[in-house]
Each structure stands twice: as structure tokens, then as C-alpha cells.
Amino acid sequence: MAAHQPIDLGEQLDITVVASLKEALSDALASGQTVALDGTRLQRVDAAGVQLLVAFAQAAGHRAGWSWQGGSVPGPVTEAAADLGLADRAQPVGGPL
Amino acid sequence: MSVDLSQFLQTFFEESFEGLDTMESGLLELDPAQPDAETLNNVFRAAHSIKGGAGTFGLSAVSDFTHRMETLLDRLRDGKQAVTPDAVNVLLSAVDCLRGMLAAIQNDQALDADAISTAQRQLDEQLGQVPAGDAVPVPPQGAGGGHTAGPEGTPPRGSGPGGGGGGWWIRFEPQPHLFATGNDPRRLFQALQDLGELEVEADPSGLPPFEQLDPETCQLAWTLRLHADVDEAAVREVFEWVEDDARLEIRPLGAAGTEPAPVAEAGSAVASADEPPAPGGGAAPAAGDGRKPAARRGNAGGGGNSSSIRVDTEKIDALIDMVGELVITQSMLSQIGKEFTAERLEELQDGLAQLERNTRELQENVMRIRMVPISFAYSRLPRIVHDTSRALGKVVEFQMEGEQTELDKTVMEKIIDPLVHLVRNSVDHGIEAPEERAAAGKPETGTITIEAYHKGGNIIIEIADDGRGINRDKLLAKARSAGLVEDGSELPDEQIYDLIFHPGLSTHDQATEYSGRGVGMDVVKRNVRSLSGNISVRSSHGQGTTITISLPLTLSILDGQLFRVGDQTYIVPLVSVIESLQVDAGKVSRVTGRGEVYHWREGYVPIVRLHELFDTEPVRRELGGGLMVIVEDEETYLGVFVDDLLDQQQVVIKSLEANYLQVPGIAGATILGDGTVALILDIAGLIEMSRGGRRQPYIPEREDSDEAA
């Protein structure tokens, strides 16, 4: 199944954007297609952002799956997830981190 | 601008002690079979308030300890842990311990490290975090100033880091609103990383499915292991801003650096680094070591007794009304005074009468302010019954009646210990063991009832049990063998039962069935008497015992009858005066062993000559034709022979004991309108003296009295 248009996470994945991002992610999940996230511009990631990502990864894992645009986990996400002990949960199943 | 918190410290103590009472009564109410959620909530809230207040005042020993209680209570109310009798008992012990801690801090005394350690261990066992019997680090600090982390080389426990070495195990469970407060756990963890190597283990078990997630709430929790040679204060400081928004648990890592040592939850066993450890980590150092001077000032002179009183605004409003009336009367009198003529005499007299009414009403209202319900004194009793009956394997139903009966705060505070003693005695020596009761055809559950009510100018407190009663004959035999009662002489029952208050009998033969009631009963009686009260016993062998205490409503003012003997003016409480009469010499008899008696109302009353008792010089010695005041105390009558009867008036009671010595037969003194001092007679004391009781002043033994009962 073809990947949906990547969702651009912008420069921040934090408490200020999680509500609107959740809606976008929900819509993408509802489409039934694999969801791609574009985190190339990300600069700031906080616990709220990682939490949303973890919940999304869990939900998408049960559906059509998801991936990071470009294949690798953005650096800020890696760092934040590692800081929060969630490194292995903020990536697609089997994916690199 | 800094705020001097010390001014609020006393209020904190008062509220905390009230909170402890609430916790205690709530825990006693709690039925483990069917725990009431609201009761648990109440107990939890009380613990939470104490913890919060203690935190505010920097009393970390208290806040840490309370946090454990709160954690256990939280689990109980959330149903995460079953309410068991053991859990309730542990919490009750913790309430006691906390009360002791607060009292120690309030009085600038050292904390009881052993008691705290024991209570903490019991709490931890309940929390499932310490194997039964394992040791828990003791906060080895003086009052209040927070726990002491042993710096290097002096850990509080053998394997624990105590601020160095092993590091810290941290459980961090944010509340959902944590993000909304602007806090980011990631920043906290980064701050911890600055302290040392940090292992972070996220717990996403609370994370709901994506669709149900409110992304702006925090649904994660973390377990952290910080391998750093830092004290707990440094760790805690990291979480300083989120303490109210998260559940935080910090424990020293075990020797291996991986397994957490026995719990020291949120506040833990070791904390701030601003104090040195106690040598050996055991004995608490001198009181108040490390405490803030401000806190200490706040306690000055506290003496453990709360010095303030909460007053209903209604009572204050009534006072203001009274003062308003007084001002009106005063201005009216002032007006009359300015333009006084003989014709206005009646008006002046009316005004003075009005002034008298106003003054009396004002006084009554002021006195009402000091009146508090006796429920304050009752509050400790259910616990006493619970603990004592449990320890003795007895089943006791405790009933309290008249909780709203009011009495003077001072009286109330001083009657608590005697009541505790009497109720404990009732459980211990009154109520029989279940099998003994069953054998006697009684229900296995014994009943103890305490009731308070007003009668005349007194408050009556009755403590009744349906236990085995006092064995009159054994008591009498004991008194005879002790030489207190002459062989062959018979005494009325009430006088025999009164012997249990005799110090000579008080500690003898504890194994006998009545003797237990004698232990310390003399002290109980002394305490009651010091309140100008009386205590009496009724008992029926096999059916139970009732102890009745009669206390004046207030210790400050009484309506008195004044009379004169020689050059001395004496006062008796008006409520005690039955009759004043002119002595008919024909009705005076002399009875061997009882002195002079007067035939009065188909009976005989002993005559007391005050000048003999008090060794003064009377005007008149001849009884016939003289004046006698018949006074009563607890249905015992006495004829007081006087030279002259004077006015009746209200007098303000001044303590003779506080200003001089406790003198038998004298309840206090007052200053009359002309400036002279008059002695207020203690009728019960006079009766005792007339029976050959002590006449010399008591040399003060305040400590003895304080530890009474």
C-alpha cells in the first residue's frame, strides 16, 4: 500500500503542538495507509511529544504501519526518547534508532 | 520581601494535632470488612494537610513520615491494598508517632528515633517494601530540621549510600496535569544526568490507546536509577517544582547499586545535607539541632498545650452586642452623673441595675468563649478502649454520650488524663474476659459508657461499665489490714468504695480483682480535686462500676456566699449552700469519733469550726445562738460554724496553689471590692478534714501531678 503524504512535524514536537498533531495523526491512521513522518526540521522534542509518538507508534503498529521519512529517526527524537527511556518505543517496529 | 513563617507555626501545630485526632477517630471508625470510602478520604486529607504544612515549615522529618502514611492511605482508598486490621493498627501507631514528633518539635525536644524507626518499618511492611523485621533507616536528627544524610563514611544504614556511594532509586509518577504546569520530565532527567549516571526506565502501562489519549496530559511514569555520590537533597531539589504534581519516591540504591534498599519514600530516610549526622546514626542529637531559629521562637513557652482557642463567630457577635449595650448604659450613667439631682436617684439606681445586668451578661458571654465541647476530651478515649481491649483480648463496646456538653477549656484539658486513666481501668479491670463473662451469663461484649451532662453549676461525667464490679468485702478487708479502717467498724458502701482512691491502697495486690482500680486512682482523685471537682464510685459486685466526676463549669468565677470567722472572710460556692441557720444548742450532740454533730432535717451533720481547722482566732466559740451554714457536697452535708454572714457576690477565683501552696480545705482565693483577700472554701476538702484528713498544705509536686493517670 502506498504511503500517505508524509506528515511534516515542523520544528517542534512538544506540548504546544501535540493536540493538533494528534488530529493529523488520527486522520492519517484512519486512512488505512502507512503513515510517514517527516522530522527532518525538528529541533525541539519534549516528553509530551515523545508520549504522543509512542502512542501513535503503538496504534500504527497494529494497522498499516508507519515510518520515518528518509528512514532514520531524527536526531532530536532519538535524544529525547533516550532521555525518557522510550528509545525503543518511538520508532517503527524493527526499525533503526 | 520575606515572610516570617514562625508566626504561623503554632497554628500549624494546632491544626496538625486536630488533624491527628481526625485521623485517629477515622481509623477507629474504619471497619476493615467494609471500609468507608469517605472515612478513608478524611483520614487521607488530614495526613495530606499535615504533610503540606510540615513541608512549608521545613519540617522534613514530619513531612517525610507523613508521606509514608499518605502513601499507604492512598493505596487503601484506591483499593490497591486491602484495609486490614493490621494496616489500621499500623496507621494508628503512626498517628501516635507523628503526634510525638510534632510535640517534640513544638517543645524543642529530641525526636524519638526508635519510635520513628519502628513506625516507619511498620508502614513500609504494609507498603510491601520491606520484609517484616528488616531495619529501616532512622532519621537521626534533632527536631524538625529535616533528615540527615550521612556524608561519606557515615551512611544511615550499612549498605545504603546515605548521600554517597550507591546512588538513588527514584520512582516518578507525574499527575496528568504535569505538562500543563510547564514541566517537562525530560528536563528533570537531564538535570539528574548532570548529577551522575542515570538509568531511565519508562513505564507506559498507564498510556491509553492512541484514540483515547489526551496528548496534553502526562500518562507515563518512570523508574530512575541515579548512580551518583550525591545526597538526597540534591536529588529532591531536581524535583522541587513538581513535588505537588507528581508522586515521588526516592530510596537509596542497595549495596549492589541496582536494587533499591528498603523504602524511604518521597522524603525518605535520609535527606537534606545541611545537617551533620548523629554520631553512630542512632541517638537523636539535642533538641532542635539544625532547626530554624524562627521555628524555635514560635514554640517558645508552648509547653505542649495549645494556647489559643477557636471561637464561633456567633459567640463573638454576641460579645460585641453586649459591649454595645454596656456603652449605652455607660453613656446614660455618665449623663445622669453630669446633671445629677436628688430627683434622679431612681434613674441612677435603674442605670446601675442595668450596668450590673450588662456586666453579668458580658461576663457570661466571655465565659462562653472559653467553653468547648467535651468531645475534645472524649476524642482520645476510643483509641484507649481499642488498644487496651485488643491487648487484653477483651471485646468492648464503647459508647460516648453528651459529646456536645460544654465546659471550660482549662477544665477540659486537665480532665483528659484522668478520663483516659479511668476508661483504661474500666477495660483493664472492670470488663471481664469474654469467657468469664459468658460463664457469668453476660454477653461476651462488655460495655463501657461515658456520659457528660450539666447539673446545676457543674458538669457531671459518668464512666460506667458492666464488668465485674468492685468486691466490697475484699476492699474493706484490705483497708482493715492496711489500718485504714478500724476492725469491727462498719462503713457505708460509698465510703468503702471511696477507699479505692486512697493512696495506701492504690498499688497493692494488683492481682486482686479490685486493686487495679486503685492503681493511680489517688492521682486521679487529686487531679479532679485540683479542678475543684469531686469523684465518687458506685459499684455492684458482678454487675459493674460507675465512676462519677463532678466538675465546675469554669474555674474562673463563682457565685459565692461570704461569711466571717474572726478577722477572716471566707467564701463558699453558693451552689453548695443549703441553708443558713441559728444554732440551737439543744440540737448539738457530741459523738465519739465524729466530734460535734447537729441534728438537722431528721439527720445529723458534722459541725466544722473553721478557726480550729485553720488555726485562727474566732470571735465566738459558743455554738448555741451562733450562725451555721449548712453546705453540701455530693450529698454529704456539713455545718460550718461562722461568726457572721456577709453578702452573696460573684468572685473571681485566684489560684492559691499557683500563688502559694495547695491548702487542704481551700479551693482558692479572691480579692474583694475593698481590696482584702478572702479564701474560698473547698467543701469536699472540709468534709475530708472534718473526718480527720490532712490539714497541712501540700508541698507542690507538679511533676507528680502532671503524670497523673
Image: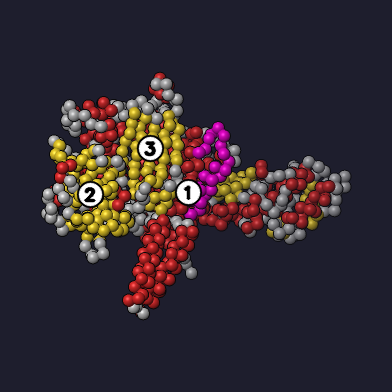
* Residue B31 falls within the magenta-colored stretch: yes
Badge 2 amino acid:
Leu
Is the same chain shared between marks 3 and 1?
A: yes
| For the residues bearing labels 2 and 1, Cβ distance under 8 angstroms | no
Q: Position of residue A54 (x, y in %)?
A: 71, 47
Specify whether residue B84 is painted magenta. no
Residue type at tag 3: Ile
| Spatial CA span between label 3 and label 2 | 37 Å
Label 1 sits on residue? B19
Q: Which of marks 3 and 1 is nearer the N terminus?
A: 1
CA distance separating discs 2 and 1:
55 Å
- Callout in the foreground (3, 1): 3
Badge 3 is on which residue? B463
**Is B258 left, or right, of A64 in this rendering?**
left
Residue at figure coordinates x 20%, y 40% from the top left: B599
Write down the chain letter for disc 3.
Answer: B
| Quadrant containing the C terminus of chain B in the rendered view | top left
| N-terminal label among 2 and 1 | 1
The residue pinned by badge 2 equals B581
User: Can residue B566 be seen in the rendering of this structure?
Assistant: yes
Other-residue count near label 3 (Cα within 10 Å), few / some / many at <14 / 14–19 / ≥20:
many
Residue extent of the magenta highlight: B29-53
> Is residue B512 depicted above or below B260 in this figure?
above
Q: Rate crowding at label 1 as few (under 14), some (14 to 19) or many (20 or more) other CA atoms within 10 Å.
A: many
Please name the predominant secondary structure of the magenta segment in the image.
Answer: helix
* Residue B610 appears anywhere in the view: no
Instruction: Name the one closer to the observer, A49 or B438.
Output: B438
Picture residue at 54% right of the left edge, 56% below the top: B240
**Which label sits on residue B291?**
none
Q: Which amino acid does label 1 sit on?
A: Gly
The part of the image, by quadrant, that contains residue B238 is bottom right
Q: Are marks 2 and 1 on the same chain?
A: yes
